[in-house]
Image: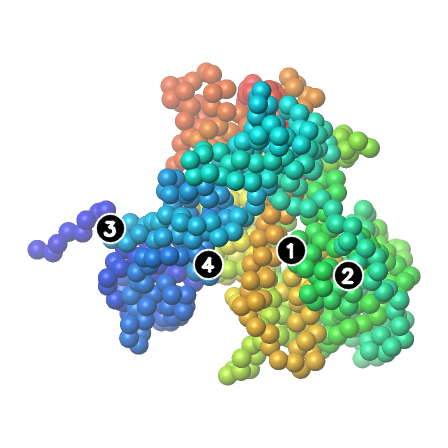
Amino acid sequence: MAKKKNKKEEKKFPSGFNRPTLRKSIMEIVKSTPTETFNYKQISKRLNVKDDSTKHLISSVLRELSKENFLQEISVGKFKFSIKTGYKTGKLDISKKSNAIVNVDDTDEEIFIPQANLHHALHGDTVEVYVYARRKKSEQLEGEIVRIVERGRDQFVGIVELSRNFAFLIIEHRYMPYDIFIPANKLNGAKQGEKAIARIIEWPDSAKSPIGEIVEVLGKSGEHEVEMHAILAEFDLPSKFTEEIEQVAENIPTEITNEEIAKRRDFRNITTFTIDPTDAKDFDDALSFKILENGNYEIGVHIADVTHYVKEDSVLDEVAEKRGTSVYLVDRVVPMLPEKLSNNVCSLSAHTDKLTFSAVFEMDKDSTVLNSWFGRTIINSNRRFNYDEAQLIIETEQGDLKDEILTLHTLAQKLRSIRFKKGAISFDRVEVKFILDETGKPTGVYFKEGKASNQLIEEFMLLANKKVAELIGKVEKGTQAKTFVYRVHDEPDLEKLGTFSKFVSKFGYAIELENNEKIAKSINRLLTNIKGKPYEEVFQNLAIRSMAKAEYSTKNIGHYGLSFRHYTHFTSPIRRYPDMMVHRLLDRYLQGLSSVGQPKYEKKCRHASEMENVAVQAERASVKYKSVEFMKDKIGQTFKGVISGLTEWGMYVEVEGTKIEGMVSLKELEDDFYYFDEENYCLSGHYNQKKFTLGDNVQVQILRANVERRQLDFKLLTNV
């Protein structure tokens, strides 16, 4: 009689595989049986894989995991799990639920750290961990933090709470579970209830809370400037440059010499223009247009030559690399480079000679690129358009440079169409913008949507980024690719997509998971079908979360969302440090010089990706703050809304016409005991069987608007 499998030991794997899903599945198999050896055939059998292409991918993933030291290759083609007791170094990640994981440097390995073994380590710290020997086959690797190698941050923002002889800084950061004890002589003038920044100065082993000192008093909680500076401090972002850095920027020579012009291709007599937002101050990119004698078009994508002025390893370069990106809050830009450079010297303002780094294309009427040229140039822009002005020309076929803009619009739409046919995914997000008075108070809300004029610029920027990446990344078989900085987006995890597919099926939609082409087409179909629906933004957010995050890397795995095999960021060096790296590397390789070291640039890429993520979080926090501030004088008023999210603690409701979201907690639903039915994705009443589901129209009353916590609380009045 065949032995029955223990249900607890039985492991189900998805029916379809791609590289991310295979990595996860293989790692689970080898971790669950750490003493066994495997080759690609045995893994294929365990995963019920029968097609040769997936077997080939399994073999590739096994070699990849071996290089990362997750597996040991004990003989040719035979692998086993690397037993990892001893000391490891990595970054600590503490989730909202206080689960702590150390992500081991340069691997996919995760080590669970129980609360008792954190030993005062905080989220984002680089730590040394002692990894315990595995006690059970199925148990996750577990360890204990033995040393804090480097603090992720030592300054935190909070509200001062005074006692007679001491104070605490009450921290609201979700990843900081401790308040900071402040001795009376370390208050630096801070008063009760003020927002301030404290630095941790010591943390004795026996103390529950760290001891700190106030380093900056921001001011009265709830005031506009105080809260905006608090957001920057919360995410450890600088609010200004030092006087030294400003002076270095002021002293940069700005005169364009004849000697410099002679080194460059001259575009000053070719029609050139910029198209940017109305309130833009820095202009990264310009387009030039010329009809060639053969009837084709010469289109130049001209990018500010920032690296001509900011030399590698200079103090300005170090500051730009540390910041990684400009940060766009609701009411301000925190630039990556000082204003002298970002808004003046490098910015491609009209009627002024400007130094640029360019990608120039010969294209036919079908938008096919016939020839490409890359190099340093000089331009003089004829006209600055904002997006609305360019849009009016596209719609009316009248206005300055109408022939050039209309031709570029036609070519851009063809490029866009080709991109989507090849499997690009169309996430067209609507941005919430606020009308602010002179004090920064929000007086109105409006939405910013991408139109044809935005798409015109977008498509030519995408083309330039793609072609620059292809120039360096495409190599002949048998030759070694040079180190380069790519913008990569991995294939989606099929398990996450499967969960998303199951969710949307409850609303009558479907995601086909058979292959990448069908996934992309079905997601695009979904995004088209939900346009204008109450749950459009929720579905978009869930779809994005089921995907991998785009990031910077020297390892070119392609860009899944754009359906590009090669892609980089070349077009925004004023506001993104990776683009500066790309300019320097491109210039180096155009000169025929040798490749640079990969580890150094991979480390730079990781930092740039981290800073991009921090900037996005800060931007979202500023929008949330203004949303709550906009509603705080409307306490007690009622609004129509739509249920935009459901959780085990309540429902999120989006106020009609504003995209401002608040929470109706379960305790505010007084007519019954409600619970979150995850299977059917609804809140369900225990006795009355009443259900609340995504997209339901409701009426709510504003109960509370906590500006400091950036939190809105609603009371449900009725279904509409």
Q: Is residue 533 visible?
A: no
Quick one: quadrant of the C terminus? Answer: top right
Give the distance between the C-alpha atoms of the residues marked 3 and 1, in whole angstroms: 43 Å
Secondary element at image label 1 = helix
The residue indicated by pointer 4 is 105
Percent from the top left, x then y, of residue 26?
Answer: 34, 60
Give the distance between the C-alpha atoms of the residues marked 4 and 3, in whole angstroms: 25 Å
Q: Amino acid at mark 3?
A: Lys
Q: Is residue 122 visible?
A: yes
Q: Amino acid at mark 2?
A: Asp
Percent from the top left, x then y, of residue 51?
Answer: 35, 68
Give the distance between the C-alpha atoms of the residues marked 1 and 4, in whole angstroms: 20 Å
Count residues near mark 3 (Cα–Cα under 10 Å), then give few for <14, some for 14-19, many for 20+: few
N-terminal of the two: label 1 or label 4?
4
In this view, the mark in front (2 or 1) = 1
Extreme residue toward the left, this view = 1
